Image: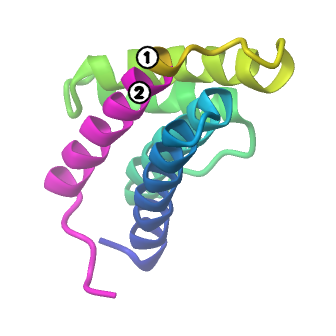
Amino acid sequence: MTDAQADLLAQARDSISAARLLTENGYPAWAASRAYYAMFYIAEAFLEGDGLAFSKHSAVIAAFGKEFAKTGRVAAEHHRHLADAEDLRHTADYGPRKSVEPDRAREVIEHAQQFLAAALELIGPLPDE
């Protein structure tokens, strides 16, 4: 695991923690956005391991799908959940204030947690902080 990958995975872990706190305190839209960013950081960590970096979210998602999901290096469901979470983030960030239900936020957080668990297994555990 590179230092950059470790940093991205730590950011993902922290984003999942923040998403849980936001949901518990009545902010499901903000929580969904944080959960998306957790998954985005994880996808970036996988790509970093192959020396790939992109400046656009759409490019990261597409490259992760091509390089990892379609090749079977990572379960395809993680790519699907990442793409779905990006759509939800747009709704959460730009839609009506109550556009994300708490149950939907919790579901996306669970997907982010599963994606992080897969990353920690495939990339390696985070160094002790």
38 and 18: which one is in front? 18
Residue 79: quadrant of the picture = top left
Task: Give the percent coordinates (x, y) of residue 99.
Answer: 71, 11
Task: Give the percent coordinates (x, y) of residue 48.
Answer: 46, 57
Task: Give the percent coordinates (x, y) of residue 23.
Answer: 52, 36
Q: What is the residue that sits farthest to the left in this orientation?
A: 121
- Mark 1 neighbour density, 10 Å: few (under 14) some (14–19) many (20 or more): few
The answer to whether any part of residue 48 appears in the image is yes
42 and 129: which one is in front? 129
Q: Check disc 2 and give the amino acid type.
A: Arg
- Left or right, 78 with reference to 105: left
Q: Which residue is mark 1?
A: 103
Q: Quadrant of the C terminus?
A: bottom left
- Give yes or no for contact between labels 1 and 2 (Cβ–Cβ under 8 Å): yes
Q: Which residue is mark 2?
A: 106
Q: Quadrant of the N terminus?
A: bottom left
**115 drawn magenta:** yes
**42 drawn magenta:** no
In the rendered image of this protein, does residue 101 appear above or below residue 12? above
SS label for mark 2: helix
What segment is highlighted magenta in the picture?
105-129
SS label for mark 1: helix
Q: Residue at x 37, y 74 (%)?
A: 2
127 and 68: which one is in front? 127
Q: Residue at x 64, y 34 (%)?
A: 27
Residue 103: quadrant of the picture = top left
Q: Residue at x 81, y 19 (%)?
A: 97
Q: Check disc 1 and give the amino acid type.
A: Asp
- Cα distance in 3D space between marks 1 and 2: 5 Å
Q: Residue at x 55, y 34 (%)?
A: 36
